[in-house]
Amino acid sequence: MEREEQTDNSLRTIAIILLCCATAKLLHLMGVITVEDKADDDLEMTMVCHRPEGLDQLEALTNFNKRELQVLYRGFKNECPSGVVNEDTFKQIYSQFFPHGDASTYAHYLFNAFDTGSTGSIKFEDFVTALSILLRGSVTEKLQWTFNLYDINRDGHINKEEMTDIVRAIYDMMGKYTYPVLKTDAPKQHVDAFFQKMDKNRDGVVTLDEFIFSCQEDENIMRSLQLFENVI
């Protein structure tokens, strides 16, 4: 029983780490982490389909300074010359991080979390706002963003069906090499354990308050949230 609980706690921690790690890998792929900084003082505005908001406004809305925003924009523009990224492109980029699995479903959920306006595309503002939360936000902000990722239908609650979809997507993404022996009922077991821990009032759904409270009680999750704070 204790071993099963440790496994369930590990899965929740892995889910958080995957989110942060994939963010870091995305920055690396875009050349943001290793890029040499240029002397430009203003955001480069080349001929793109979408022009991002000005530096001052983005600096006020995020936890990044102007120089960091410049570096982020160059990387974003290098990977997305049009100034926006659609879901298919996002999935192609994301799939490079998990070559032994199928990341398409998890990438779909992650894309929707970035696309807060449900426009079908991610603009630089969407991208940098999410990064600001995941890398520089408070614990509550990071957990709220993660909750919104899991709340697939955006009704303010996480139900068992949504959590099952998320867990299956994580298994698919990690691939057969990570889980060589995976029982067919493993996702259900993890979901049941998730609700046992987080559904405090046993009403069949997990609210934002319950999610935040339960995560804050978990030392592993708290440590994982701090892993990538200084990635850029």
Image (cartoon, rainbow, N blue to C red):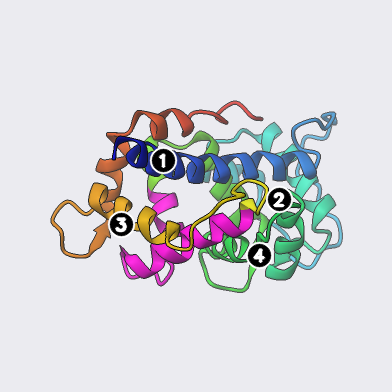
Return the disc, 2 or 1, that comes first in the chain's sequence.
Answer: 1
Q: Is residue 20 magenta?
A: no
Q: Eyeballing the image, is 150 above or below 15?
A: below
Q: Is residue 231 visible?
A: yes
Q: Which residue is mark 2?
A: 98
Which three-letter amino acid code belongs to the residue tagged 2? Answer: Phe
Residue at 38% over, 36% down: 139
Mark 4 Cα within 10 Å, few/some/many (few <14, many 20+)? some
* Mark 2 and mark 1: Cα distance apart in space: 21 Å
Q: Regarding mark 2 in the picture, which secondary structure is present there?
A: loop
* Nearest to viewer (mark 1 / mark 4): 1
Residue 157 appears in which quarter of the rendering?
Answer: bottom left
* Nearest to viewer (mark 2 / mark 1): 1
* Mark 4 and mark 3: Cα distance apart in space: 24 Å
Whether the residues at callouts 1 and 4 have beta carbons within 8 Å, the answer is no
Main secondary structure found in the magenta portion: helix
Which three-letter amino acid code belongs to the residue tagged 4? Answer: Ser
Q: Which residue is mark 1?
A: 7
The image's mark for residue 192 is: 3
* Nearest to viewer (mark 3 / mark 2): 3
The image's mark for residue 104 is: 4
- What is the span of residues highlighted in magenta in the rendered image? 144-173
